[in-house]
Amino acid sequence: MPSTTVSVPPATGIPVDEALRLIRATGADLERAIERANLARDHFKGDEVRLCAITNAKSGHCPEDCGFCSQSSKYQTDAPEYRLRSAEELSHDAIRAWEAGAGEFSIVASGRAMTKERELAEVEAALRTIREKTTLLRCASLGLQDRASLERLKAAGLQAVHHNLETARSHHPNIVTTHNYDDEVEAIRTARAVGLHVCSGGIFGMGETPEQRVEMLEALRELDVDSVPLNFLNPRPGTPVAEKYNITLEECLAVIVVARLMMPAKEIFVCGGREVNLGQRLDEIFRAGANGTMVGNYLTTMGRGVEKDLQAIGRQGLRPVGITESATAPAKTRRLAAGDPRPGRSTARLPVLG
Ligand code: SF4
């Protein structure tokens, strides 16, 4: 492999042929690529780190057959099953995440799409309360939503939509058959048309090739999504994709590096599966190019505590967006910062989106 120049990439990112070389980088080549991704993250994002949290608003009973997902009704798994939780419970989760340091919060529900009037009204009510009581960026991940429902939720305070491509177009039929890749793209385009911030990424380690990893990242670049969540498969017993699990620690780092170098100015998050797949190098996600991560628990699996993430971020000289003093200080020693009723928080650098 030719040596990699450690320089800041252009805002449009590195070309695909270079990404295809770097996605296979290991050893010293990978370390050099990490150095470059770190430089790019620092150049485009400075010392700011975004923290996103989610709540599993409705779990299981899903008619779709996404092969990685323990919430699909097609597979025998131990995932919890419950109907949509109340607006009060959802907003309570949001406030707790905000107080713990999250800047962004997503209401995530299982299912192909949320269409029932009762459910949409509940999410609307939750969004209104979250808007009233926190400075969180308000996001929802509800499936293949139509334009009318998104406009309605936007009026209630929705600012962002999360909808993953899941994987490369060429691999998508191996992962899910109840909807297709174009449906995912349509969901993203609809959210964009409504004027919402779009968060879209996928899951790596589902039997795809390194080339298909680049294929998906290139698709996200072409769709010009705002945030890119990178997830690494945490194989769930009972799901068919668990048997295809095929990603190593170095490959995870290479995915983060290539995402940053292809989309240097975007928000690159490392989310699900990071603890399981990155192990001892978990804290290196920011050096590898990420400028955001998901804190707290995931949909059906546990994350490490937010305090550990905040400590790791602080050790690296980085700063969670919106936090003006150490969130790891005892709560009673934190002071109210101007403009933000959270102990020790400031709204000065909260993202303005949508
Ligand atoms: S990823 Fe979403 S749509 Fe797919 S099976 Fe899981 S809950 Fe259903």
Image: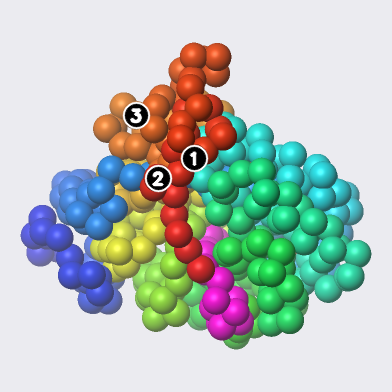
- Residue 163, image quadrant: bottom right
Question: Considering only order in the chain, which callout, 2 or 1, is on the residue closer to the N terminus?
Answer: 1
Mark 2 C-beta closer than 8 Å to ligand 1: no
The residues colored magenta run: 189-207
Q: Which type of secondary structure does the marked residue at label 1 adopt?
A: loop
- Residue 110, image quadrant: bottom right
Q: CA distance from mark 1 to mark 2?
A: 8 Å
Q: Is residue 169 left or right of residue 325?
A: right
Q: Who is closer to the viewer here, 69 or 129?
A: 129
Question: Considering only order in the chain, which callout, 3 or 1, is on the residue closer to the N terminus?
Answer: 3
Q: CA distance from mark 3 to mark 2?
A: 19 Å
In this figure, which residue is indicated by the disc labeled 2? 348
The dot on residue 220 is none
Q: Residue 136: horizontal and vertical position, in percent?
A: 57, 48
Q: Who is closer to the viewer here, 160 or 10?
A: 160
Q: Residue 331: horizontal and vertical position, in percent?
A: 55, 18
Please report contact status of discs 1 and 3: CB closer than 8 Å, yes or no: no
Instruction: Please tell me whether mark 1 or mark 3 is closer to you in this view.
Output: 1
| Residue 224 visible at all | yes
Residue 200 covered by magenta stretch: yes
Q: Residue at x 66, y 35 (%)?
A: 96
In this figure, which residue is indicated by the disc labeled 3? 314
Q: Residues within 10 Å of mark 2 (few under 14, many from 20)?
A: some
Q: Residue at x 56, y 71 (%)?
A: 196
Q: Locate the N terminus by quadrant.
A: bottom left
Q: How is the image coloured?
A: rainbow
Q: Residues within 10 Å of mark 1 (few under 14, many from 20)?
A: few
In this figure, which residue is indicated by the disc labeled 1? 339
Please report contact status of discs 3 and 2: CB closer than 8 Å, yes or no: no
Q: Is residue 190 left or right of residue 290?
A: right
- Residue 11, image quadrant: bottom left
